[in-house]
Amino acid sequence: MDTLGGLLDAPRARGAFALRTVMQAPWSLRVLADSPLTLIAGVTGEAWVMPDDGEPFRIGPGDIVVTRAPAHYTLADHPNTEPSVFIHPGQQCRDAEGNSLREVMTHGVRSWGNDAAGSTVFLVGAYEHLSDISDRLLRALPPMLSVKASDWESPLVPLLCDEVVKDEPGQAAVLDRLLDLLVTAVLKAWFAQQEANRPEWWRYQGDRIVERALRVMHDKPAHPWTLAALASEAGASRASLARRFHELVGEAPMTFLKNWRMALAADLLCQPNETVSTVAEKVGYSTPFAFSAAFKRVRGVSPQEHRSGVREA
């Protein structure tokens, strides 16, 4: 696992918010939702994004915008259209007087807008739980970024567009994984385009010591790693590994390992043939109790609560 791969392994949607939005001009949405990470993908027509801090820009079919909290912005058919719909935390949709617009703007399964036959269509995917996105990834991103359709190519947007309106057993899990894939692909394309604005750790790409340590943690998460053992595998002293790893990855090696184990555990807990005990063993914990305590510290919920939440989504 290279450094960028380790960073982009972070999105792990768990009951993410996914919606197909259909609008007819004039329209304007004021977004105050504070979701940790939100993706907006143009499908048909055009829309304008007006960040609170920054110049308005247009998105068309195939263009992608990614925002992170606490950035607020307005999304509209034109920069001069005044907001008439306000999206609050929890994706609560209200008018200027605070009245709910949920029923009047809902047009079927995960379809929403001011006109079911509107000419502008875009997808929204939002991570609603801070624990689903690593702090390391959020720190590497600006409040808002965009990727133009001409700068990347992927079948994921049409696929998500098809899947988001389906009402089938297990569909929420399908949408979670598609959103993870789309966000990862978009961020990979965005990072590849950066020059002056690349995060500080980018200039350390290719560091043999750090990438060796990342690879062994990725390949053998259950191994009882210590800083000394990782340094030995990487062919460096403990001090050198700790310094270079923190410069490159943004956190200590053992902190990265803990977060990687919990991300892997979150996925394993979604599998019907896994138990808390088997997952604990696979991610390097000697007892289910120790694993459960660590999981709750990192993810904010117990393994059982995480599993239940995924099944209910």
Image (cartoon, rainbow, N blue to C red):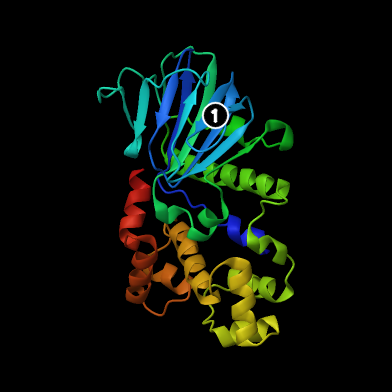
Residue 147 location, quadrant: top right
Q: Is residue 127 visible?
A: yes
| Camera-nearest residue between 122 and 156 | 122
State how many labels appear. 1
Q: Is residue 165 visible?
A: no
Q: Is residue 38 left or right of residue 87?
A: right
Q: Is residue 33 left or right of residue 260?
A: left
Q: Position of residue 264 (x, y in %)?
A: 50, 62
Q: Which residue carries the number 1 mark?
A: 161
Q: Position of residue 299 (x, y in %)?
A: 38, 61
Q: Position of residue 258 (x, y in %)?
A: 47, 71
Residue type, numbered disc 1: Cys
Name the residue located 35 percent from the left edge and 73 percent from the top edge: 288
Q: Position of residue 263 (x, y in %)?
A: 48, 61
On-image quarter of the N terminus: bottom right
Name the residue located 42 percent from the left edge and 43 percent from the top edge: 16
Q: Is residue 27 above or below residue 62?
A: above
Q: Is residue 81 above or below residue 165?
A: above
Q: Is residue 132 left or right of residue 253?
A: left
| Camera-nearest residue between 26 and 233 | 26
